[in-house]
Amino acid sequence: MKRLVSLLTSCVLALPAVAFSEDLNEVFKKVTEYSQQRNYPKAMEELQWAQKELEKLHQQRLQELLPANIDGFKGEDAQFQSALGFTNIERQYVKGDQSIRLSISGSSGAGGMGGLADIAKMGMMMGGTQPGKEQFRLDGRTASLDSSGGSPELTVFLDSGSILQLQTSDESIDGASLKKFAQGLKLGDLDTYLKGSKG
């Protein structure tokens, strides 16, 4: 059973990498036609195709909202994963031998991670007084910088409910550098879009 679950998860995670070129208007037209015929299995099948096409457009929009260059770091192609109603986008930024990994975690639709993000935020607030951990506001949003380990990690809790993280394994990048990098992100535009508002 565990092997089957692992296989299914792998298949789901691979879905966003497949290219689809369905015309959304045509797909929704088919949904309407099948619904009128009371052929609901086919209508739901068409809706699944529509969802895949919308996921592709959503991924393209997210990549557009992430700057191609930040503080001399060049962004590589973004990677997307989706499973069990949650999505994750990762983009590696490179400058010479240095690299910073950006990730955004949230739900498949507007609303982010809901209560999970609130719990994580509360845990961060409770641990903010520990040595090497700092809480601050970044573009009006709650953020945390953890420099207690070998490399710093910066977390931003977006108003949309999604969580943005910056991580590096490069010891030459300190907390101040990570903060400066974070300031180059268009958090307002990104957050507005993730909330489902026009963006």
Image (cartoon, helix red, strand yellow):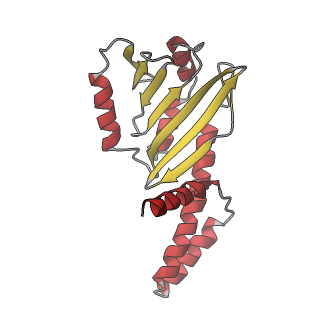
Name the quarter where the N terminus is drawn: bottom left
- Whether residue 62 is visible to the viewer of this picture, yes or no, is yes
Q: Is residue 101 above or below residue 43?
A: above
Residue in the picture at 37% in, 16% down: 133
- Tell me how many marks there are: 0
| Pick the front one: 194 or 97 | 97
Q: Position of residue 157 (x, y in %)?
A: 40, 31
What percent of the width, then of the height, locates residue 109?
Answer: 45, 52
Out of 22 and 125, give the one closest to the viewer: 125
Locate the C terminus by quadrant: top right
Residue 66 visible in the current orientation: no
Is 145 displayed left or right of 185 in the figure? Answer: left
Query: Which quarter of the picture shows residue 76?
Result: top right
Instruction: Answer with the quarter of the image where residue 91 lies.
Output: top right
Return the residue nearer the eye: 146 or 114: 146
In the depicted structure, whether residue 173 falls above or below residue 82: above
User: From the viewer's perspective, is 120 left or right of 181?
Assistant: left
Instruction: Name which residue lies at 66% across and 66% down.
Output: 22
Q: x, y percentage for residue 195?
A: 44, 43
Residue at 50% over, 14% down? 175
Question: Residue 44 appears at what percent x and percent y?
Answer: 49, 74
Q: Residue furthest bottom?
A: 37
Which of the 4 image quarters holds residue 46? bottom right
